[in-house]
Image (cartoon, rainbow, N blue to C red):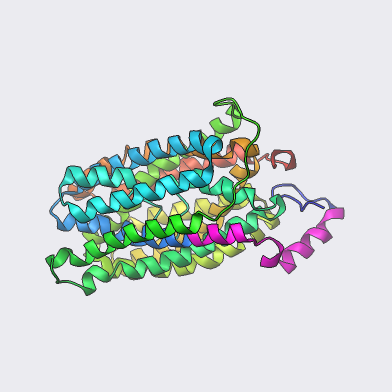
Amino acid sequence: MDSIPPWVPVSSEDKSAKMNRLEGGVSLSHWLNKNLALLFAARVIRSITQAFLVIVVPIYLARLGFSAVQIGTLFMGTTIGGALLILAVGIGADRWGRKRAIIVLAVLQALGAAGFVLSANLAVLTLSSAAGTIGRGGGAGSGGAFGPFYPAEQPLLSEHAESKYRNEVFGFLSFLGVLGGAVGSLLAAVPQLWPGGPFGWRTGYLFLFALTVFSSLLLIAVVLPVSERKRTVKRQPFQLSWRLLAKFSVTNVFNGLGIGFLGPLLTYWFYARFGAGPAAVGVLFTIVNLLTALPYLISAYLGNRFGVVRTVAVTRAIAVTLTGVMAFSQTYFMAGTLFALRMVFNSLGNPLRQSMVMGMSDEGERSTMAAFSNLPMQVSSALTPPLGGFLMDEGMLGLPLLLAAGFQGINTVLYWRFFRGVRNKDLH
């Protein structure tokens, strides 16, 4: 018997059965299998890498002498590259294989990291960052849940997870991701702990970029044994649920505008506002990753208890408020505390949002839906990093955070407006 979807109101006769599930929880043995375990391992590897890159890349660029505007422009290029990759993965993964898409992305990540090892030229670094999405990935507390891997990874996970356990699978995936992120954040201290060497102050940074090349190859080795169902029925290109896609896209446009002011620029904000180096930011991000681990595990419970849309909207609203307050922080401790609280509330809703996209999409269009619904976010998030960098160069360090809170507040309102009526028939 299928479990009751979290967004369906529970009638009196169903409440007892549902509460038994909520109180007892779901054991890993009910849904864990070899393919999920391999995909979980791949997420951990990717989370470790993304966690230290999102910290060290902005600081590395600043130490090379680039301005905040130049850094913001580089990340604009990275975001555009990521958007193009998401588009390619969305179109290709449903047709030629999701596992194959992950492998290609890992190769590009290795090549991008190699560019950072071999050159300090801004044009080369921009091209390398765009090709491998180096330095982008959601930051602390995200668990590696964003970027071009998303439209290939999420449907592949859904393929090996029963629909009634999908919330638990996505929550546990994010839980493992933030634990990996905690390890990666600690590794971000390497440049400060290794200030000298054959390449001077760059030695520790270059070591981490080389480590990224290795981890990308390891990711390929882990993903290769994953099985993938052959799609025997070919769907016509772009035969999507357009109304559903439009709703996800509109909300994600505003989310992307806010993310563009945060992302890697947030690391630069800690560096410019409080003088926090990679070690200090790494410790903060490690703490944040550990704090967000538990919320990822209980997100499925909250979604089942209060409804997915309500849980996402409320936790998102609290996170947005904390982002705005964070702009007025006077000390690194205060800013770090508010940032940690923001990410805790943000992490309560993220797995539910991802699970809902998969649950409302037909199996044959999941990669395409995941990609096309997130493409507007990627495009809009490419517009604001140069503006954020300009504002920081002009001394208005808190304004980008206020703008981010404003745009993500609009995202929250639209999400509630569009999806508050979602019912059982929308879940596949």
Answer yes or no: is residue 63 visible: yes
The image position of residue 77, as x and y in percent, is 28, 40
- Residue placed most toward the observer, 95 or 362: 95
- Residue placed most toward the observer, 79 or 306: 79
* In the displayed structure image, the side of residue 411 where residue 301 appears, left or right: right
The outermost residue toward the bottom is 193
**Residue under the point 76% across and 51% down:** 4
* In the displayed structure image, the side of residue 135 where residue 247 appears, left or right: right
Which residues are drawn in magenta? 13-42
**Residue under the point 31% across and 55% down:** 266
Q: Residue 377's quadrant in the figure?
A: top left
Dominant SS of magenta comes to helix
The image position of residue 55, as x and y in percent, is 30, 60
**Residue under the point 44% across and 39% down:** 86
Looking at the image, residue 111 lies above or below residue 199: above
- Residue placed most toward the observer, 179 or 200: 200
* In the displayed structure image, the side of residue 217 where residue 239 appears, left or right: right
The outermost residue toward the right is 13
Q: Residue 253's quadrant in the figure?
A: top left
Number of numbered tags placed on the structure image: 0
The image position of residue 269, as x and y in percent, is 27, 56
Q: In which quadrant is the C terminus drawn? A: top right
Answer yes or no: is residue 147 visible: no
